[in-house]
Amino acid sequence: AFGGLSPILLPMAIAGLGIVASLIGILLVKVKEGGNVQGALNFGNYASVVASGLFSYFLIKWMLPVGDITIRGYTFDANHVFYAVLVGLAVGTLMSIITEYYTAMGKRPVNSIVQQSGTGHATTVIGGLAVGMESTVLPILVLAAGIVLSFKEAGLYGVAIAAAGMMATTAMQLAIDAFGPIADNAGGIAEMSELPKEVRERTDILDAVGNTTAATGKGFAIASAALTSLALFAAFMGTAHIDTIDISNANVLAGLFVGAMIPFIFSALAIAAVGRAAMAMVQEVRRQFREIPGILEGTGRPEYEKCVAISTQAAIREMVLPGAIALLTPIVIGFAFGPEVLGGTLAGVTVSGVLMAMFQSNAGGAWDNAKKSFEKGVLVDGVMQYKGSDAHKASVTGDTVGDPFKDTSGPSMNILIKLMSIVSLVIAPHIARVGGTSGMVPAPLRTELSQPHVRFVQNAPSAAETVILRALQVVY
């Protein structure tokens, strides 16, 4: 079927029908006055997942041939590929549910931060850190189960297809994720425009839901990055002629530790950049208050463009060093120490980066909604606390700490993981070993990459290797 290219074309076809499924889900998002906004968004999300599963079933039956398919020594059939897609959809859905639990208002994690706000700023920060760390447990277990199950269904191709299935509803996830900042800016405009109180109350509800949807979108993104990086990692090993990566090897173990360190220094640079930009912004605002008369009274016009310029310049300039680290680290390690050490580095980056991303995104979202809980009033130690109270001020401190977590360093982790994996895959032919992991001579570029044809049932070894490499690259 399809000239032997159906395993390669299938991920793209799943992604294409996923757009249609996402449109169906978006059309089903409806909420009445005073209705449950989060519930409406969830219904549309679940509908798009179900539609993607149904479309994938018929698509797989149509594109893949009847009988066994062998790719890289692993034999499976069309049903197993469909099961791998279902695993990917289930992992993405469970990630969204778990993230919503840890970041939504009224849930135990956020309520625990609210209660700790009653005893001061420090306990608020401590509570948010604890929630963020706790929130990594269930997602990692779900992700690990998804990797194992999809591999059992169709080998590494199954893992890649699971990633394609998870990302099939990307359009819906992006729509839900974009809902957050739109609602946030609408609330800011309503407050600056001094619109009636009921308008701000509505935007506050949307903003609180938006914080949760933004967190679920980040959780979905990091889960897809983890599955995709595993597929790219397998492609890297095949291209670099690595049979195994032995962590008992001192060099590989050193690379593993270096890789685990990179997300931390990357996050540190990103958070420090936020701090420097914030200080520059505060200094500019103070200068305008001093030098421009009538700003507080509303008669003077502030120089808005200068504040915007500070943010824009910082966003571009401060990312040069983190970007260089992500690009140059694989190149330096690969050419200096070989593909095995680079493989250990990628493993360390992936594991550490996934955990850091989940921790930071969920902690930031929980802090933000803990602060939002005071808008309508919340019971803290038997006393109703409202906006402006000491407990609310403590929650604002937590939210201030959480903003660079959830909006800067957390989301950047999935970019770091994917970018390093892609760079490693690009340079893999140039650092490949002849004779597998024991060889020490760079291997020549292989010409069979230009012949991505497969055979079903009995695959030639070179064709099988070509298929899995091309399929994994397509999934990314």
Image (cartoon, rainbow, N blue to C red):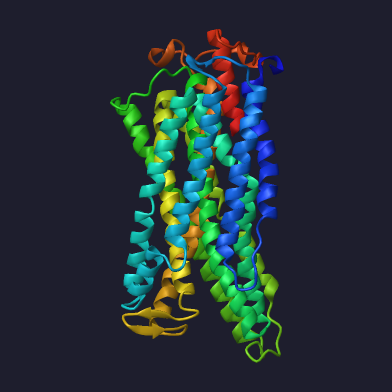
Q: Which of the image's four quarters has the C terminus?
A: top right
Residue at the (55%, 21%) spot, across then down = 468
Q: Position of residue 41 (x, y in %)?
A: 59, 58
Number of residue marks: 0
Depth check, front residue: 113 or 433: 113
* Residue 79 spot, x, y in % from top left: 54, 25
Residue at 42 percent across and 85 percent down: it is: 389
Q: In which quadrant is the N terminus drawn?
A: top right
Q: Quadrant of residue 315?
A: bottom right
Q: Is residue 49 above or below residue 371?
A: above
Q: Is residue 74 above or below residue 118?
A: above
Q: Position of residue 45 (x, y in %)?
A: 59, 51
The foreground one among 323 and 44 is 44
Residue at image location 55% in from the left, 65% down from the top: 209
Q: In this orientation, does residue 24 appear?
A: yes
Q: Image height check: is 101 above or below 197?
A: above
User: Is there any visible trace of residue 420 in the rendered image?
Assistant: no
**Whole-percent x and y of residue 287?**
59, 80
Pick the front one: 262 or 348: 348
Residue placed at 56% from the left, 62% from the top? 38
> 27 or 337, which lies in front?
27
